[in-house]
Image: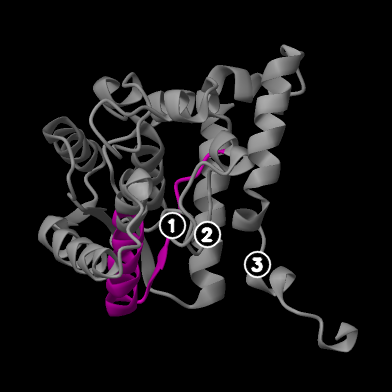
Amino acid sequence: MMQETVDKIVQWLQQQVKETGVNGLLVGVSGGVDSAVVAHLIKRAVPHQSLGVIMPCKSSSADIEHAKDVIESCGINALTVDLTETHNVLFQTIQQQVTHKKEWQEKNHSMADANLRARLRMSTLYTLATNYNYLVVGTDNAAEWYTGYFTKYGDGGVDILPIVEFTKQEVREMARFLGVPEQVVNKKPSAGLWEGQTDEAEMGISYAVIDAYLRGQEIPEKDKETIERLHKRTEHKRIGAEHFQVDKESI
């Protein structure tokens, strides 16, 4: 069953390459299970035209090591672009200008910092994609997509999404089938936004509960409310900008 699923995704990826006329596919490898699965899939789809990109930026040493483990496990072509200094210069420049106007909101510091890192990474991927004539492949799973747990124009800014219809549990099962290292499969999901940050703590709900909800299973009412609140609040992330344009005829 899993072999059939993987084969279909690989064929779909190959079809995207053919239809768009690009040379290959690339993905940012974070050290997490979702990007690990995508790295393995694109390596299978286009063995000689696939690229895994490690982009340290205030990253933990464990995440960097796990990313390297993923690269080694699938044998994908890889490169590392350290964005730490670039991020520091840009963020400090912005902060200084806003502080000079006495309008800096310290309470938003952590999120602004984290979102800038995500957007710098995606800018890096698109620069590389243009150089190689590759598509940028996204790593969002079904739970992240439904709840909007991704950065708009950051890790959400991609060309194609091969695992977006798979729950977190299904992604883990696929990871084991593909040969993703166990230390990556079993680690607590984290975007690495700050020390000790985990996805589930930030969302206020577990992936297991979200997965159950997406499968149509019964979950506590308060969990339903949390999931639907997240879904509604992040609607703008899942639809194109054309949905937010002014209708000239109505003016």
Amino acid tagged 1 = Val
**Image: magenta residue range:** 117-141
Picture quadrant of residue 219 = top right
| Marking on residue 160 | 2
Give the residue at mark 3: 240
Amino acid tagged 3 = Gly
Give the residue at mark 1: 137
Horizontally, residue 39 falls left or right of residue 55, namely right
Q: Main secondary structure of the magenta part?
A: helix
- Residue occupying image coordinates x 15% and y 59%: 88
x, y percent for residue 61: 11, 34
- Residue occupying image coordinates x 54% and y 46%: 9
Q: Secondary structure at mark 1?
A: loop
Identify the mark nearer the N-term, 1 or 3.
Answer: 1
Q: CA distance from mark 1 to mark 3?
A: 18 Å
Check the picture and name the quadrant holding the C terminus: bottom right
Amino acid tagged 2 = Ile
Q: Secondary structure at mark 3?
A: loop
x, y percent for residue 131: 27, 78
